[in-house]
Amino acid sequence: MDKTIKQRILLGVCGGIAAYKSAELVRLLRKQDYEVRVVMTHSAMQFITPLTFQALSGNPVATELLDADEENAMGHINLARWADKLIIAPATANSIAKFSHGLADDLLSTIFLAANGPVYIAPAMNQAMWGHSITQENILRLKKHGCHLIGPESGDQACGETGLGRMTEAHDIVKLLSRANAPLKNIKLLISAGPTREPLDPVRYISNRSSGKMGYALAEAANNLGASVTLVSGPVGLSCPSGVTRIQVETAEQMYQAVISKVAESSIYIGAAAVADYSPSNLSEEKIKKQAEESIITLQKTKDILAEVAGMANRPNFVVGFAAETDNLEQYAKDKLARKNLDMIAANWVGKEQGGFDSNDNALQVYWENGFKTLAMTDKKHLAKQLMNLIIERMDEKDTA
């Protein structure tokens, strides 16, 4: 995947109150590194100005079918050929009717007919207009001709009514577009995240300072890249990312059982959890009372989930481990990479002023056989995207080796 080539999005904006959402859509598309150009109908300009879209997209806004200033007076052809994707948001009932019957009486409708890439339509209209049989027939006709429908959603409408017809929110449209091209589409990915708790008695347990933020960020990033993600999570105070299946566990043994039950169907396993290395040998059924000045707790080793997964005969195609170290980070990470037969290991410092456990930021030293890459300190969501892209690159190289 050549990350130097930006995808080109041509956004068509029709005349409806939902046009204000299109401004946010342009902003989010630019944030995702798409190159965006905007085409507006004359009705759309009654709701929002071309200057707004020009400022947000960084490109001139096209509004006229017959533009004397256009180099060859073929703006509709030039824009249609420029775009990798055409998105029409909002798409009004009037525009949908024109598109479905092949009418071409303005710039956007002619671009629609000339487009040779994927076309996405996000309807926005009154719930009665959406439910009308003619509109539904038009939608069916567009689907038959290969258009992709986004929404509409149900909810309160500007007219005061409630029902289907609201334009899908901008962030959901961007997420759908990202998944449509997703490099991990049809890939099942398993992630373990967060700490485990090893009980001493009904009140106390042994645990660690892991917040689960890195694992949850990886689950969200993988889902956004098209993967079907299962997240095995220890006890954390985080919401499950949208679209991710979460299995909640508490102890190392429960995490082991959950991972083993899902790993055979997974192509990628990322062991981001801070699993306890030891658990108490004896669990007291009653609260242990404070008595002697000293107390000895006997511990026993827990199962090494990461090593067992990497050593399975039917192991996932790509296994990634994590290493949190207070010293000799490179030495310990490389040793773990080789000893546990991993495809990649992501190592980070703990006990430092920045990053690590219970922080929103982190930095990683990522190692694989005969290679490494430094991912500089940044917020964990951005770091997760960088690490997932690196995993994809290494998987591609592994598959072609």
Image (cartoon, rainbow, N blue to C red):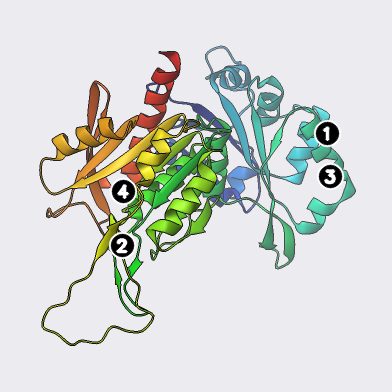
**Three-letter residue code for mark 2:** Ser
Where 123 sits versus 233, above or below? above
Residue 187, position as x, y percentages in the image? 54, 34
Foreground tag (2 vs 4) = 2
In this view, the residue in front, 120 or 253, is 253
The secondary structure type at the circle numbered 1 is helix
Residue 44, position as x, y percentages in the image? 62, 44
Query: Residue, x 67% and y 38% (percent of image)?
Result: 121
Check the picture and name the quadrant holding the N terminus.
Answer: top left
**Three-letter residue code for mark 3:** Gln
**Three-letter residue code for mark 1:** Arg
Name the side, left or right, on which 301 lies relative to 35: left
1 or 2: tag closer to the N-terminus: 1
Tag 4 near tag 3, CB within 8 Å: no
Q: CA distance from mark 4 to mark 3?
A: 44 Å
Residue pointed to by mark 3: 136
Tag 2 near tag 4, CB within 8 Å: no
Residue pointed to by mark 1: 141
Residue pointed to by mark 2: 279
Query: Residue, x 69% and y 25% (percent of image)?
Result: 110
Residue count near mark 3 (Cα–Cα under 10 Å), binned few <14, some 14–19, many ≥20: some
